[in-house]
């Protein structure tokens, strides 16, 4: 659900930066506590992710750097620092107890019942906040200036939704890992965007695609040995994106191509009909027959085009001769006049 707002706000790289920024927080939490308690590690990841997020905001506002540059800087800095800490931890006496590498690529098999309950609780909290602040989130998304003129605290709303995006990313680290978590934030939302122009429908579809990706990915992973769950979930989500990019009725490549072919055929049909009108208007009798061979000199004319005109009852055929029907003559006159006006 929250990924929809990241996509529509053109902050697609934010998920990647936050997930990588969470890594040093996990390592520092382990170094401070000496245990791999998931709640403690995730708290460290949350704090580190929030710090990285606000650093990104600060760089964008206080400097002339653009958002993509700030995201790239923070991503590289935090991830490099996190890898440095992981290398340091591996050389410690209790390195075997760490198991922090699972946060890089995820390891769903290590999830406990308590982890699932925590995810369910945070998901419920996210849903409640999303419903309570739906109007504010929607206004900020599409017109921040108008939201501010209405007296809303846009800074608070922006921080609120960003915080919950960070929280959602941190919760997913244990399942799909730092490297792949951004895909789980963005892929369902990107797929949902292809199917609708409504924000509410997009959020619903995004949640649906994300849920199915998790269920199908886990099922596929469980059916085979040595098949990591996190990457499989991301691959399934990518399949949803691919299908949406191809098959979505309004934006899908397939339907775009179909509409392009149809428009090209209609244009060819109209040009042929206008050309026939130009020939027929020289006669007082609109039903005056003309040889088909005259049309062969017209660029773009085909027998299929002629058959389509016959089906539409614009043209009648008699052997190798044709003439415009009354309906065809009127339609052709309008098309011819439109073309003349356009050329002028």
Image (cartoon, helix red, strand yellow):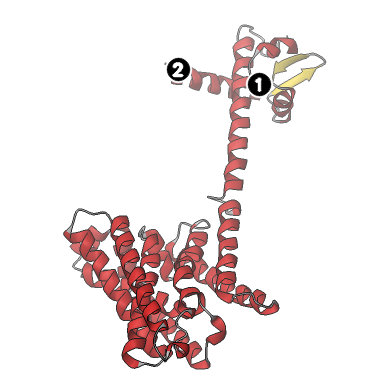
Residue tagged 1: 326
Label 1: element kind: helix
Distance between the alpha carbons at the discs numbered 2 and 1: 26 Å
Query: What residue is drawn where x is 54% and y is 23%?
Result: 334
**Which picture quadrant has residue 155?**
bottom left
Label 2: element kind: helix
- Residue 167 visible here: no
Q: Position of residue 319 (x, y in %)?
A: 82, 15
Viewer-side label of 2, 1: 2
Q: Is residue 127 left or right of residue 246?
A: left
Q: Which image quadrant: the C terminus?
A: top left
Q: Is residue 87 left or right of residue 48?
A: right
| Mark before the other along the chain sequence, 2 or 1 | 1
Residue tagged 2: 343
Residue 287 in the image: above or below residue 153: above
Q: Is residue 69 left or right of residue 266?
A: left
Query: What residue is drawn where x is 61% and y is 26%?
Result: 268
Relative depth, front residue between 64 and 148: 64
Q: Position of residue 200 (x, y in %)?
A: 44, 66
């Amino acid at each position: 659900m929250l990924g929809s707002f990241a996509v529509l706000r053109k902050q697609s790289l934010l998920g990647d930066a936050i997930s990588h920024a969470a890594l040093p927080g996990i390592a520092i939490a382990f170094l401070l506590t000496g245990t791999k308690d998931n709640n403690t590690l995730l708290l460290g990841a949350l704090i580190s992710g929030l710090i990285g997020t606000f650093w990104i905001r600060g760089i964008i506002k206080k400097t002339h750097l653009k958002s993509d540059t700030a995201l790239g800087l923070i991503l590289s800095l935090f991830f490099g620092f996190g890898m440095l800490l992981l290398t340091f931890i591996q050389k410690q006496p209790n390195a075997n107890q760490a198991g922090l590498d699972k946060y890089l690529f995820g390891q769903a098999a290590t999830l406990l019942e308590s982890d699932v309950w925590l995810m369910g609780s945070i998901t419920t909290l996210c849903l409640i906040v999303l419903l309570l602040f739906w109007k504010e989130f929607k206004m900020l998304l599409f017109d921040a200036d108008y939201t501010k003129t209405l007296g809303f605290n846009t800074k608070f709303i922006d921080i609120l939704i960003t915080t919950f995006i960070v929280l959602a990313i941190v919760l997913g680290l244990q399942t799909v890992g730092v490297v792949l978590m951004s895909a789980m934030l963005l892929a369902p939302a990107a797929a949902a965007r292809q199917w609708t122009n409504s924000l509410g429908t997009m959020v619903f579809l995004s949640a649906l695609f994300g849920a199915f990706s998790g269920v199908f990915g886990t099922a596929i992973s469980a059916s085979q040995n040595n098949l990591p769950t996190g990457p499989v979930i991301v691959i399934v989500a990518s399949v949803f994106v691919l299908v949406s990019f191809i098959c979505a009725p309004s934006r899908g490549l397939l339907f775009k191509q179909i509409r392009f072919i149809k428009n090209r055929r209609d244009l060819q049909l109209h040009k042929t009909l206008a050309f026939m009108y130009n020939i027929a208007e020289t006669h007082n009798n609109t039903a005056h027959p003309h040889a088909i061979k005259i049309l062969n000199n017209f660029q773009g004319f085909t027998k299929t085009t002629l058959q389509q005109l016959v089906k539409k009852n614009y043209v009648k055929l008699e052997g190798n001769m044709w003439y415009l029907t009354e309906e065809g003559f009127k339609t052709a006159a309008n098309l011819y006049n439109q073309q003349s006006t356009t050329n002028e």
